[in-house]
Image (spheres, helix red, strand yellow):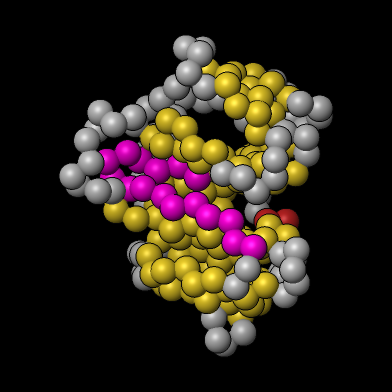
Amino acid sequence: MALTHFSCASLPATPWKNGGGTTREIACWPAGAGLSDFGWRVSIATIAAAGPFSVFAGVDRSIMLLDGEGVRLRSRDGRIDHRLDVPHRPFAFPGDVEIDCTLQDGASSDFNVMTRRGQWRAEVRVLAHAADVASAAHGVLLALRGDWRLNDEGQACREGEGMCWTDAPHAWQAVPASPEARLAAVRVLPADPMASRDER
């Protein structure tokens, strides 16, 4: 898959084994990889009940509230206590940590980015104005609010739609159609070989 347009509404929802929610996968690498062997993965989850997050050893995560009242994330070792209750504000944390999730008030949905530490790293931004997205061989764009025009050809992404690409460099010029528009821009890049594995 080089470049694909997607609509969140048409992504199949997979129920969690514990019954606490569902996940809609946007993209993963390598194609067809499972939860134990992906290099990177981008998805949307609906959290319908309190419970523990799955532990992903050796994985870095970024989570962002899309809608609903949000959740509170607390690690069992006390290092993390975060209220994910402001939409479109990414929160990064290591997937190795055991985290319990409680609902603020009813179900909510969030945007998730996971990268295999030592292999990949993710840059997650939320654009509110016209901006350039530098070239990357892998990535995802998602119109969170309002419509966006991508590149000079005028390729359009309506709210709830996006573009994902793998193993083929793409750069973007993103222009909002209205002042309140917001766009999630994820660039997945090779991990820095000089970075220490003990940093996190």
Give the residue displayed 40% in from the left and 61% down from the top: 138
| Quarter of the image where one finds residue 34 | top left
Position of 80 relative to 85 (above/below): above
Residue 159 in sight from this viewpoint: no
| Quarter of the image where one finds residue 143 | bottom right
Instruction: Please identify the quadrant where the C terminus is shown.
Output: top left
Give the residue displayed 47% in from the left and 32% down from the top: 93
- Does residue 175 belong to the magenta stretch? no
Q: Is residue 27 left or right of residue 16?
A: left
| Magenta stretch, residue numbers | 113-128
- Main SS category, magenta section: strand
| Quarter of the image where one finds residue 110 | top right
Give the residue displayed 58% in from the left and 21% down from the top: 81
At which x and y percent is residue 49?
73, 24
Q: Is residue 13 left or right of residue 63?
A: right
At which x and y percent is residue 45?
64, 40
Q: Residue furthest top?
A: 77
Instruction: Please identify the quadrant where the N terminus is shown.
Output: bottom left
